[in-house]
């Protein structure tokens, strides 16, 4: 598979066929789809993947784009959304929730692999992790369609 060097780490990240990398050095955990919510105590749609990692672990842009949001968003806590433009005829954005600290601002251009923040547990969260979302034309889809 093709790889991409992760800035300032020496790590080589696998590049997906759509041109995305993993947003952190970890594995995905809780998958996209209906699940029993650990805080709200009922089954509802989980519109992303959770990636378990220690608070303070760096988060990276999964693909180049423009930051359209970097701020507090309710249950998502500190949340960054990056617009990657049109890919295969669809507008694609990624969202990175529960951050301890964000290192980007709205309107900023980011490159794939650029640090955008740190893993945290802000918002509706039971512990340190990244909740990653991918949107196609504004609708959440399984991030594993894009992330290797």
Image (cartoon, rainbow, N blue to C red):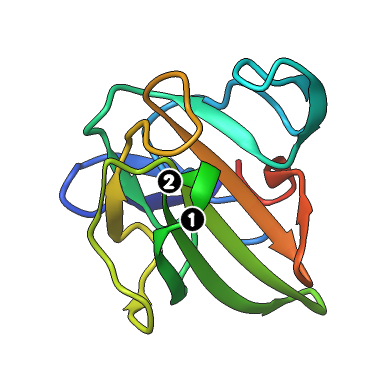
Q: x and y percent of residue 95 in the render?
A: 54, 55
Q: Which image quarter: residue 7?
A: bottom left
Q: Which residue occupies the foreground of this view, 36 or 2? A: 36
* Relative height, residue 49 to residue 3 (above, below): above
Mark 2 residue crowding within 10 angstroms, few (<14) / some (14–19) / many (20+):
many
Q: Which residue occupies the foreground of this view, 129 or 84? A: 129
Name which residue lies at 78% across and 50% down: 141
Q: Is residue 4 visible?
A: yes
* Relative height, residue 92 to residue 85 (above, below): above
Name which residue lies at 60% across and 41% down: 148
- State if disc 2 and disc 1 touch (CB < 8 Å): yes
Name which residue lies at 53% across and 38% down: 131
Q: Which residue occupies the foreground of this view, 21 or 107? A: 107
In screen coordinates, is 87 left or right of 65?
right
Q: Residue furthest bottom?
A: 107
Name which residue lies at 50% across and 28% down: 51
* Relative height, residue 127 to residue 110 (above, below): above
Q: x and y percent of residue 2 in the render?
A: 52, 50
Q: x and y percent of residue 146 in the render?
A: 67, 51
Instruction: Give the spatial CA distance, label 1 vs label 2.
Output: 5 Å
Q: Is residue 21 visible?
A: no
Q: On the rendered image, what quadrant is the N terminus found in?
A: top right
Residue where numbered disc 2 is placed: 77
Where disc 2 sits, the SS reads loop
Residue where numbered disc 1 is placed: 73
Mark 1 residue crowding within 10 angstroms, few (<14) / some (14–19) / many (20+):
some
Q: x and y percent of residue 58 in the render?
A: 26, 41
* Relative height, residue 41 to residue 111 (above, below): above
């Amino acid at each position: 598979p093709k790889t991409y060097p992760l800035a300032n780490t020496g790590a080589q990240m696998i590049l997906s066929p759509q041109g995305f990398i993993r947003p952190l050095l970890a594995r995905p955990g809780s998958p996209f789809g209906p699940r029993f919510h650990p805080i709200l105590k009922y089954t509802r749609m989980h519109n992303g993947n959770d990636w378990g990692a220690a608070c303070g672990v760096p988060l990276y842009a999964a693909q180049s784009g423009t930051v359209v949001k970097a701020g507090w968003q309710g249950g998502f806590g500190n949340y960054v959304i990056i617009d990657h433009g049109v890919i295969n005829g669809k507008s694609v954005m990624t969202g990175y929730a529960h951050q301890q600290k964000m290192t980007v601002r709205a309107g900023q251009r980011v490159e794939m692999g650029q640090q955008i923040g740190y893993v945290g547990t802000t918002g509706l969260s039971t512990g340190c992790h990244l909740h990653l979302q991918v949107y196609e034309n504004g609708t959440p889809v399984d991030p594993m369609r894009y992330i290797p």
